[in-house]
Amino acid sequence: MKLSNLMLAACLLTVARATALWAGTTVDWRGGEGNWEDAARWEGTLPSRMTEARINGTQEKPSQVTLAHADVLVSHLSVAEGGSNVASLVLDGPSLTVIGSFDVGKYDGSNGRFLVKSGHVFAGTIFLSGGGGPGQRGRGTVEIHSGSLVTKDIELGVSAGCNSTLRIVGSKASGIVAEDGLHIGVYNYLSLEKEPPPSATELIFDLDAEGVTPIFTWGKTEGRVNFPVPDAQRNGLGTCRLRINLLAAPPSGDILLIGSANPCRGAFTDLAEGGTVRAEFDGKTYEWKLTYGGGGNQCDIMLTDAALRLPAEIWFRM
């Protein structure tokens, strides 16, 4: 699926979100490992466009649901929403459309993971580790290996004390697009928490020989990366760290990580404009400079000025 088609799908999804009725019923996964298409694991009824699907599991018996055979449309979806729940969802082939919000890890002690091995995801807003209210100190991870993901917004580390990870593995994914971009850091809803602890967010890019599939934002006014900022009382400053891993020797040129319609607000933790980023592969250390003002519109986040450090500390330009 080409990027232009992904953006068209996103527009259609926005219209669908605005006109669809919200869920009238909730369907819960019964726990353990299994296939989404097994109605018996959903209390005898498969989730539909008018239902909220919830996948929860316990510490002793985590849930892992695999969606591999049928296209799915639901109103709302949560993975490890409840407190101290552990659950994961693996998409491997078909399409998954979530009309409203998609929660991955939410309340205190929860640990949720969404893995896209292949297939296409269309979601309203994706929340990793809660949406900013109290008692939402969960852990949420989204990991994309292939396929595509289209959403209005990805929110990471929005709740005080939570942990969020967004990981892009290699260059096989055909597109990762978020109209309003990434919103990262504490949102102290109605100032309900006094001196809330900071959240912790990681953006991980695993580079292969072709680089990595970048994240694109295209909203004319909102499309950007919003890094952590304090709340109105200067509480809850979150962290957002960039991690680069290598699956192979990386390409020699500049590497686009996030293509943005507007300049980002803030920066990665301890990584200012021109900061050094390093990663190792096969006994060699590769090094780049990070820029928040790359691309034709000077809004893209990129790795530039690639260099290679040999074991004998010999430098040369790639």
Image (cartoon, helix red, strand yellow):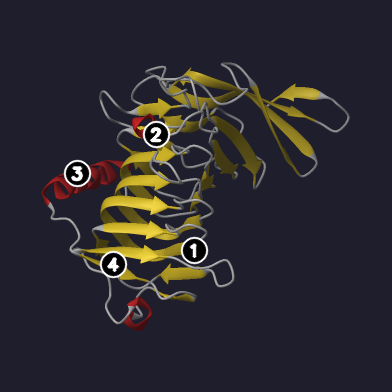
Label 3 sits on what residue type? Thr
Q: Position of residue 76 (x, y in %)?
A: 28, 57
Q: Position of residue 178 (x, y in %)?
A: 34, 39
Q: Is residue 119 above or below residue 284?
A: below
Q: Is residue 198 above or below residue 70?
A: above
Q: Position of residue 40 (x, y in %)?
A: 35, 83
Q: Identify the mark nearer the N-term, 1 or 4.
A: 4
**What residue is disc 4 on?**
71
Q: What residue is at 81 percent from the left and 31 percent from the top? A: 310
Q: Nearer the viewer, residue 43 or 274?
A: 43
Inspect this view and state whether residue 13 appears. Answer: yes
- Distance, label 1 to label 4, CA atoms, is 21 Å
Q: Is residue 117 left or right of residue 25?
A: right
- Distance, label 1 to label 3, CA atoms, is 28 Å
**What residue is disc 1 on?**
87
- Distance, label 2 to label 1, CA atoms, is 28 Å
Q: Residue furthest right?
A: 312
- Distance, label 2 to label 3, CA atoms, is 31 Å
Where on the picture, by quarter, is residue 177?
A: top left
Q: Residues within 10 Å of mark 1 (few under 14, many from 20)?
A: many
Q: Identify the mark nearer the N-term, 2 or 4.
A: 4
**What residue is disc 3 on?**
14
Q: Do labels 1 and 4 touch, CB within 8 Å?
A: no
Where on the picture, by quarter, is residue 198?
A: top right
Element carrying mark 4: loop
Q: Do labels 4 and 3 touch, CB within 8 Å?
A: no
